[in-house]
Amino acid sequence: MSIRLIVGLGNPGPEYQLTRHNAGFWLVDNLANTLPHCSLQRDKQLNALVTKTAIAGSDVWLLEPQTFMNRSGASVGALARFFKIAAEEILVVHDELDIDPGVAKLKKGGSSGGHNGLKDITAALGTQDYWRLRIGIGHPRNLNSQQAVVDFVLHRPRKEEQTLIDESIDKSLQIIPHLVAGKFEAATMQLHTKVAS
């Protein structure tokens, strides 16, 4: 098994572009920018930005649903069914409240943890058995903020948080070739190992 579809989660529209909830979009945009001749194109039928590219010598789909977050499953399910991509060949990249900015974690399966994008994808695929790349954005209570969670995810990170999130995205991009090659253990080790400063 290897990753054949990488999904970035976020909300469409310029007003959401820089908000914490769009961390999945940020990673997929950065990934597309590092690949030659790779640009996401709007697909009306899928209601998504999508492209097919090559990573580590394999064909991989990149997808950013252009529905709102809680309807992300429609485009993911449609593309996966059409190209016969199994759940365990899908990597969903999303913001994660329970992880601090600067940290990213890889896991397969498990609950949605209250994340509406994941909930909808699980419903569309009929299983939780897909991979998740969780980009830490921190939780308002751990960042000394009184903001409600809904407000927090729909606002821009503070400058110092953005720097840390960008660093975790850069680190995450380095493991994508491993995932596409099916080297999940190596990818996990590399991502979860703290670099000595």
Image (cartoon, rainbow, N blue to C red):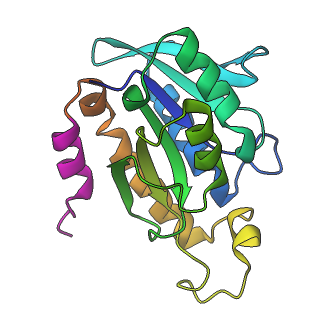
Which residue corresponds to the image point at 46% horizontal and 43% vertical from the top-left? 128
Q: Is residue 110 visible?
A: yes
Q: Main secondary structure of the magenta part?
A: helix
Front residue of this view, candidates 65 and 164: 65
Is residue 81 depicted above or below 18 in this figure?
above
Which residue corresponds to the image point at 77% horizontal and 51% vertical from the top-left? 16
Could you say where residue 63 lies in the image, as x and y percent from the top left?
A: 58, 26
Task: Give yes or no for residue 187 being in the magenta stretch.
Answer: yes
Could you say where residue 196 lies in the image, as x and y percent from the top left?
A: 17, 67
Q: Is residue 73 left or right of residue 28?
A: right
**Residue farthest front in this picture:** 126
| The residue stretch that appears in magenta | 184-197
Front residue of this view, candidates 70 and 18: 70
Q: Is residue 39 visible?
A: no
Could you say where residue 136 lies in the image, as x and y percent from the top left?
A: 47, 62
Is residue 45 depicted above or below 139 in this figure?
above
Front residue of this view, candidates 160 and 173: 173
